[in-house]
Amino acid sequence: MKEKIKIKTIVCCLMMTSMLLGLGACNNEDDVMEIFNNKTWKLVRIATEKGKEQFYQGLWSNESKEEIDRELNTFGAEGNYTLNFNCAEVNGEVTGTVNVHAVNSSINDAVLKIDGKEHTISIKGKVIGTESDKLAKVFINGIQNVFKYEGDIHNITLYFKDGNTTKVMGFTAR
């Protein structure tokens, strides 16, 4: 009887030890390379930080229905509103380049810095071309002012400042 109790005690201690070791190995740092490197991301929404809508209220305030429909057609077109990341991790720091494509403008080989522990991101580059679409202008402006990210290998959210307002851009992996 005492032997059974000892075996149960030992098994319980081993289980507790393995659980504690497993929990101790957890951290809040993202695998940035897995999330971003060699991936193409397609924009699916631009909203205010707490907004649930696909496009924030007031995005198209003075545009006609025809203009909005035209912009939504370009939004859905293949290759528009995309990000392509190429990253490298050196000594724990992730840097690289990102190619951004809106409709008529792009940012090629923009300098990229990502911190997986703090969930910060910066994208700096020169815009080539000009946009007439309101959505495309907001997209390019958002990319240039991005400061934070959340996400995984399937979806990412980029946070950006638009004046005093924080807005988000949601992307899905392609």
Image (tube, grey):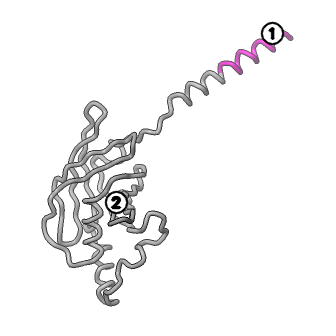
| Amino acid at dot 2 | Phe
Q: Which quadrant would the C terminus be assigned to in this image?
A: bottom left
Residue with the most extreme front position? 164
Looking at the image, is mark 2 or mark 1 earlier in the sequence?
A: 1
| Magenta-span inclusion, residue 12 | yes
Quadrant for residue 90, please give it. Answer: top left
Tally of numbered tags: 2
Eyeballing the image, is 149 above or below 10? below
- Quarter-of-image position of residue 55: bottom left
Q: Is residue 116 left or right of residue 137?
A: right
Q: Is residue 132 left or right of residue 148?
A: left
Q: Which residue range is magenta in the image?
A: 1-14
The x and y percentages for residue 21 are 56, 24
Residue at 33% x, 66% y is: 162
Please determine whether, in this image, residue 18 is positioned above or below residue 74: above
Which circle marks residue 68 in the picture?
none
- For disc 1, the marked residue is 3
Indicate the position of residue 106 as horizontal and vertical percent values: 18, 64
Q: Secondary structure at mark 1?
A: helix
Q: Can you say which quadrant of the picture contains the N terminus?
A: top right
Which residue matches tag 2? 160
- View extreme (right): residue: 1
Residue drawn at the location 76% of the way across and 18% of the way down: 8
Label 1 Cα crowd, 10 Å radius (few <14 / some 14-19 / many 20+): few
Which is more foreground, mark 2 or mark 1?
2
**Could you tell me how far apart the alpha carbons at marks 2 and 1 are, in whole angstroms?**
63 Å
Spot occupied by residue 46 in the image (x, y as percentages of width and height): 38, 68
How many C-alpha atoms fall within 10 Å of the one at disc 2: few (<14), some, or many (≥20)?
A: many
Where residue 85 sits in the image (x, y, percent)?
A: 26, 51
Dominant secondary structure of the residues highlighted in magenta in the image: helix
The quadrant holding residue 101 is bottom left
Residue 138 lies in the magenta stretch: no
